[in-house]
Amino acid sequence: MTTSSRARSFGAAAAAYAEHRPGYPAAAVDWALEPVADGPLRLLDLAAGTGKLTEGLLSRGAVTAVEPDPAMLSELRARFPTVEALEGNAEAIPLPDASIDAVLVGQAWHWFDADRAFAELARVLRPGGVLAVLWNDDARVNWTRGMYEAARWDSAGASPADGEPSLPAHPAFAPGGFAQIANPIRTTVDGLIASLRTRSFALTRDPAEREAIFDRIRAYLAARPETASGEFTLPLVTDVVRVVRR
């Protein structure tokens, strides 16, 4: 399964993605936008999916959402009918030059061609504008790491590696820092598995292999004291990397 095939897999689960994927904490958005927070903002949610990040931007300025998958875009338009929602991608953003104060990317940077995306981001951002990339990471504590190990599920890619994540250096952008913000989610075993089913790794697996993975996850969670009693807290952390347009 190629990276591009996995990137195109989400549309088949658009409604489930909107229902079960976690959002982003307000504190993460606040930190991302801090360098441009003084005035009315023109915001771009790039690779917006069904609008999990769009929702947190609505009170902060005029929001445009750009998403390549028609099914995901349709779900976003249904959920947020007042948002300008355009079909496009990071390598071909359908917006004018220097028209945006901040671009935010939630859980999608790993799908981009970084060189081509940086060129487009430099084009649409005004000088001093912000690019912020956010990841919800669920594998930073022992029991969640153990879940992936028990399932024999490679969770790499959707979240940064251990340590402080960063974006590739680019001459059009200056480093703007890194923040890590707690984003705990109350859920159940069924709710967690429903969210995991919307990951590209699950969507593109052979059905029998996918169900075997989820059987192993259920068995692991049933044996863990953190999750065996019904509702529990999934200790998500939102990582935010910020760079500033020179």
Image (spheres, helix red, strand yellow):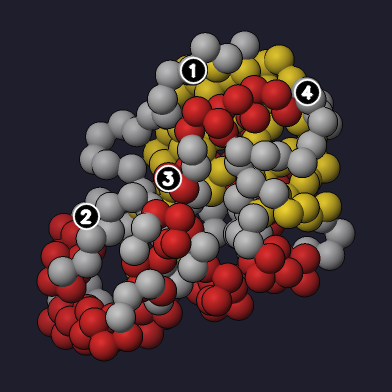
- The residue under label 4 is 98
Q: Residue at x 19, y 60 (%)?
A: 145
- Classify residue 78 by image quadrant: bottom right
- The residue under label 2 is 141
- Mark 3 residue element: helix
- The residue under label 1 is 170
Q: Position of residue 20 (x, y in %)?
A: 51, 74
Q: Is residue 117 left or right of residue 65?
A: left
* Front label number (3 vs 2): 3
Q: Residue at x 43, y 19 (%)?
A: 169
* Front label number (4 vs 2): 4
Q: Residue at x 38, y 29 (%)?
A: 166
* Disc with the residue nearer the chain's start (1 vs 3): 3
Using the image, determine if residue 229 lies above or below residue 172: below
* Front label number (2 vs 1): 1
Alpha carbon separation for disc pair 4 and 2: 41 Å
Using the image, determine if residue 152 lies above or below residue 183: below
In front here: 129 or 46? Answer: 46
Residue 35 visible in image: no
- Mark 1 residue element: loop
Q: Give the position of the N terminus as an image quadrant.
A: bottom left
Q: Position of residue 101 (x, y in %)?
A: 74, 28
* Disc with the residue nearer the chain's start (3 vs 2): 3
Amino acid type of the residue that numbered disc 1 sits on in the rendered structure: His
* Disc with the residue nearer the chain's start (2 vs 1): 2
- Mark 1: few, some, or many residues within 10 Å (few <14, many ≥20)? some
Alpha carbon separation for disc pair 3 and 4: 24 Å
Rendered image: mark on residue 222: none
- The residue under label 3 is 110
Q: Position of residue 126 (x, y in %)?
A: 74, 20
